Amino acid sequence: MTTEINPQAATPAPVAPKNGKRRKALLSLLVVVVIAAIAWVTYYFLVARWHEDTDDAYVQGNVVSITPQTIGTVVSIGADDGMKVAAGQVLVQLDPNDAKVAYEQSVANLANTVRQVRGLYSAVDSGQADLAARQASVQRARADLKRREGLVADGAVSAEELAHARNELAVLEAGLRSSSGVLSRNRALVDATTVANQPQVQAAAGQLRQAYLNLQRAAIVAPVSGYVAKRSVQLGQRVQPGTTLMAIVPLEQVWVDANFKETQLHNMRIGQPVELHSDLYGKDVAYQGKVASLGLGTGSAFALLPAQNASGNWIKIVQRVPVRIALDPKQVIEHPLRLGLSMSVNVSLRDQNGTMLAAAAPSKPVLSTLAYAEQLADAEALIDKVIRDNLPAVRG
């Protein structure tokens, strides 16, 4: 019996050639991944770990509200939204007629008080003269009574005449006591004083000072230089003290509040340099600043309705803390910013010499104005003039 052999089954299967291209591609990819990992690690340790950045940052600044200090009717408005104003410039003028009448009455009252006080000094002088005359009369009456008492025994003076002498002495002594009391009262009003610092004159001067300030405050001035915003006052409006009429924004005093995550604050210190970019100017303008302060609480802690996490359905959320960034004033003048603009903030953490909290209290006011300083000085000069004009003229 013969067996047939299939020639195809007897032939061995050919071996698949190795894929050299695939191996080279995988090897190249591995090299790229390793190089990228090394580059990233190098970048992190040399650069990235010394920087913290955020886009949750906005321009902030002082918004100075302009409010009247007295009641009045608006008769003129000196500036509108967007206009630049200088410190001391009149922004709103109230009707000054009522204040002017009160001021003139106060001037007349001070002048009259000065003259009345001069009368007190004259009364003291005349009272002293009157007291001296009454004392002389009493002494004379006492001597006369004593002489008459010695003559009664001889019958040279009658008992009736002696009684009249005693009555006359009693009347003179009563007048002496009354004159002494009046002199004491008048002297108490002027002792250790001059006309200028006598209490009645000081009270009248205080009324004039207040009336003068009310007249000056009818012209509402700008406390700082800046740009007008949010004007709401209208002509003819009757305004009350404390009513917001407009606002002034000094754009050269702006800063940036950057809201960093709480996990980004570990190495952040006051004084560290900051680079900022505004969406208004893009990457073409880079602002240089410094960390001015780290917030004392998260945004939720100072919210109107603080979060209440004492519940079963609690989910941890990374909180954000506002960090104030002080800007370079020269750059702010060259490239003005607006309140509320978005900023990109990058803080360099290499300098660790600063503190997380302010180390000392400020040695001078953070903000101040001299716009109202001259008002009281002018009032004092006016008071001195009124007092001098109502003192007796010096004759040469």
Image (spheres, rainbow, N blue to C red):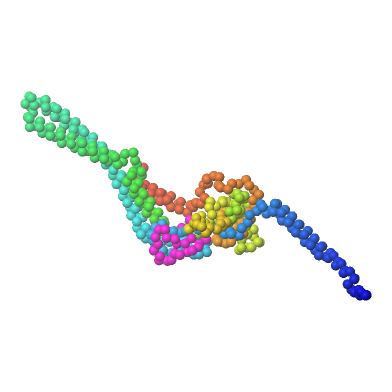
Quarter of the figure with the N terminus = bottom right
Instruction: Examine the residues drawn in magenta and state their main secondary structure.
Output: loop
- Residue 302 shows up from this direction: no
Q: Nearest the camera: 304 or 59?
A: 304
Residue 55 place in picture, x, y as percent = 61, 60
Q: Is residue 224 magenta?
A: yes
96 vs 394: above or below: below
316 horizontally vs 153: left or right: right
Residue drawn at x 7%, y 24% is: 154
Extreme top residue here?
Answer: 154
Residue at far front of view: 1
- Residue toward you, 10 or 282: 10
Quadrant location, the C terminus: top left
The image quadrant of residue 242 is bottom left
Q: Is residue 387 above or below residue 178?
A: below
Which residues are the magenta region? 221-247
Seen at 81% across and 63% down, the residue is 23
The spot of residue 212 in percent (x, y) is: 39, 54
| Residue drawn at (44%, 59%) of the image | 67
Query: Residue 372, how many percent across, how many down?
Result: 45, 53
Q: Is residue 369 part of the magenta span, yes or no?
A: no
285 on left or right of 378: right
How many circles with numbers are drawn on the protein? 0
* Residue 255 falls left or right of residue 97: right
Asked whether residue 132 appears in the rendered view, the answer is yes
Q: Between residue 296 and residue 313, name the one nearer to us.
A: 313
Q: Position of residue 16 (x, y in %)?
A: 85, 67
Question: In the image, what residue occupies the spot 46% across and 51% down?
Answer: 373
